Amino acid sequence: MSCSMLPLLATLSLLLPDWSTTQAVLSEDYKYGHQCSDQLDQPHNCSWKCIVFTQQWPGGFCQSLYNETHCRIAQSINNWTIHGLWPLRDQYCCSCWPMFHSDVEELETDLTEYWPSLLKTRTQFQFWYVTGCL
């Protein structure tokens, strides 16, 4: 394998059930860059119907960085990990709701195992806050 190989990312679009939208419409939206059937959604409504779930191979992610020394892979990590979880249509959502470490304390062990921060410059909580919808 080449050291310059980009990380292998697997993306899965999870469709939430909605009687007014079909999988075909949502797939076409994703393919052509629309935001989950904008024509079916009310403007300025903080809602979404699609979630992009992205995984990463830790070694590939670290190799893709400009400087691999900025990366850390715990010895316990030997599988694909979660890279991010984003709603596709969140531009109208309020980002002002604060999230605190205490909000995820009960999940922290599982999050650390399955959704670790591989960057030395980010704490686990900072990584989850930036790359997810917790």
Image (cartoon, rainbow, N blue to C red):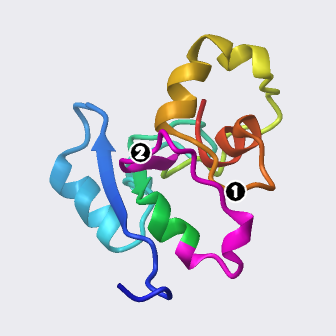
The kind of residue on which mark 2 rests is Ile
- Residue 38 or residue 86, whichever sits in front: 86
| Relative horizontal placement of residue 132, taking residue 56 as reference (left or right) | right
Asked if the stretch drawn in magenta spans residue 64, the answer is yes
Point out the tag, 2 or 1, that comes first from the N-terminus: 2
- Residue 24 on image: x %, y %: 16, 56
Q: Which residues are magenta?
A: 63-86
| Relative horizontal placement of residue 76, taking residue 102 as reference (left or right) | left
Residue identified by numbered label 1: 119
Residue identified by numbered label 2: 51
The tag on residue 70 is: none
Whether residues under marks 2 and 1 lie with C-beta atoms below 8 angstroms apart, the answer is no
Question: Relative to 88, is 15 above or below?
Answer: above
Q: Residue at x 61, y 21 (%)?
A: 108
Q: Secondary structure at mark 2?
A: strand
The kind of residue on which mark 1 rests is Leu
Q: Residue at x 36, y 47 (%)?
A: 79
Q: Quadrant of the C terminus?
A: top right
Does residue 66 show up? yes
- Residue 76 on image: x %, y %: 48, 39
Q: Residue at x 47, y 65 (%)?
A: 59
Rounded to the nearest whole Å, what is the CA distance between mark 2 and mark 1? 24 Å
- Residue 83 on image: x %, y %: 51, 52
